[in-house]
């Protein structure tokens, strides 16, 4: 007999700006996520994912200041997506009309969630998002957003071995939340970021402008050993800066903080 894992559903009410904008549009939106009850790293929602999703939704009107949106298409790859909270929230934000800094409308966006096989079932059960993004997808000025899932183990990714969906696209932004707590997996994780950067070069010709990769990395530091991440990033020629620090006050315990970093790496194809 097969027993399904007990599941709970969390609703995130996103967008803290004024409820209704000057043109009468409701600025808030809800997204619901299934997560397993009980012990599971991959099938559970983590704090940095929730906090970063809320931060980005609040900033949705100025999201192009945070995301490197330059054209009318934008492709996002999420590493260690778990149940998909961050990537699916970003899809919800992008499905609302977004313009590039040049004032051009964003027409198409793609979000690819990736994780270990054990995450797949729950991530897929959260896609399509609930409620569906159809109300925004149907808007004439909204962005058409596709959300997909593919397994990606950093042990393979760091060797440049990617599944067909990951390999087929040039990713404008890689995002990840709460994936840097296990120091043992940091070399494979940073190696995967660098391999994704190198893969971008495969889509370019010698003499093209330098390739640039951007990564939004959110973390709730738990232990000083996690700082090994920054040494590895330097070794791999990634620059990093804090975009936002969001305190998480705790009653009766030491306060925590979620830090959101922007990592960048440039290089010329020779
Ligand atoms: C703490 S969870 C965070 C999940 C999600 N990003 C969130 O914020 O809710 C860390 C995630 O990293 C994934 N992960 C750990 N090691 C991995 C590896 N070697 N390759 C791919 N994903 C991995 C786990 O399966 C898990 O989903």
Image: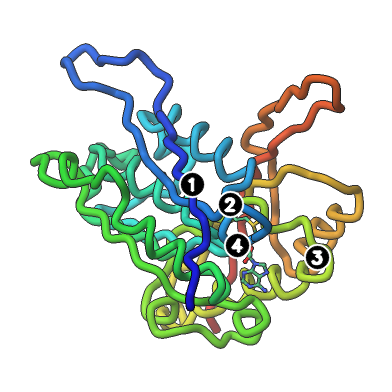
Q: Which residue is mark 3?
A: 232
Q: Is residue 73 above or below residue 159?
A: above
* Quadrant (top left, top right, bottom left, bottom right) of the C terminus: bottom right
Mark 4 residue CB less than 8 A from any atom of ligand 1: yes
- Label at residue 37: 2
Of discs 2 and 4, which sits in the foreground? Answer: 2
| Residue at image point 77% right, 24% down | 250
Sequence-first tag of 2 and 3: 2
In percent of width and height, residue 9 lies at 44, 44
Residue at the spot x=57%, y=74% of the render?
Answer: 116
Q: Position of residue 27 (x, y in %)?
A: 29, 23
**Front label number (1 vs 3):** 1
Q: On the image, numbered disc 4 is attached to which residue?
A: 42
Dot 2 surroundings within 10 Å: few (below 14), some, or many (20 or more)?
A: few
Q: Are marks 4 and 1 in contact (CB under 8 Å)?
A: no
Cβ atoms under marks 1 and 3 closer than 8 Å: no
Q: Is residue 58 visible?
A: yes
The answer to whether the residue labelled 4 contacts the one labelled 3, judged by CB atoms less than 8 Å apart, is no
Q: CA distance from mark 2 to mark 4?
A: 12 Å
* Residue at 30% in and 46% down: 130
């Amino acid at each position: 007999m097969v027993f399904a894992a007990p599941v709970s559903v969390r609703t995130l009410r996103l967008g803290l700006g004024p409820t209704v904008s000057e043109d009468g549009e409701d600025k808030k939106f809800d997204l619901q996520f299934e997560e397993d009850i009980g012990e599971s790293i991959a099938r559970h929602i983590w704090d940095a994912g929730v906090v970063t999703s809320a931060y980005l939704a609040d900033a949705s009107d100025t999201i192009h200041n945070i995301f490197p949106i330059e054209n009318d298409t934008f492709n996002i790859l999420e590493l260690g997506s778990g149940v998909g909270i961050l990537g699916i929230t970003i899809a919800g934000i992008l499905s609302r009309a977004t313009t590039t800094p040049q004032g051009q409308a964003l027409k198409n966006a793609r979000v690819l969630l990736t994780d270990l096989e054990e995450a797949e079932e729950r991530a897929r059960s959260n896609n399509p998002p609930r409620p569906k993004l159809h109300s925004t997808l149907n808007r004439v000025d909204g962005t058409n957003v596709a959300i997909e899932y593919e397994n990606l183990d950093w042990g393979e990714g760091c060797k440049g071995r990617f599944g067909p969906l990951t390999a087929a696209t040039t990713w404008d932004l890689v995002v990840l939340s709460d994936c840097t707590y296990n120091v043992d997996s940091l070399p494979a994780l940073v190696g995967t970021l660098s391999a994704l950067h190198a893969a971008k070069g495969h889509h370019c010709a010698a003499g093209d402008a330098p390739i640039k990769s951007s990564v939004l990395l959110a973390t709730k530091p738990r232990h000083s050993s996690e700082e090994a991440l920054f040494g590895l990033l330097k070794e791999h020629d990634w620059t990093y800066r804090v975009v936002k620090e969001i305190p998480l006050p705790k009653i009766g315990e030491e306060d925590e903080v979620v830090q959101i970093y922007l990592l960048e790496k440039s290089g010329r194809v020779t």
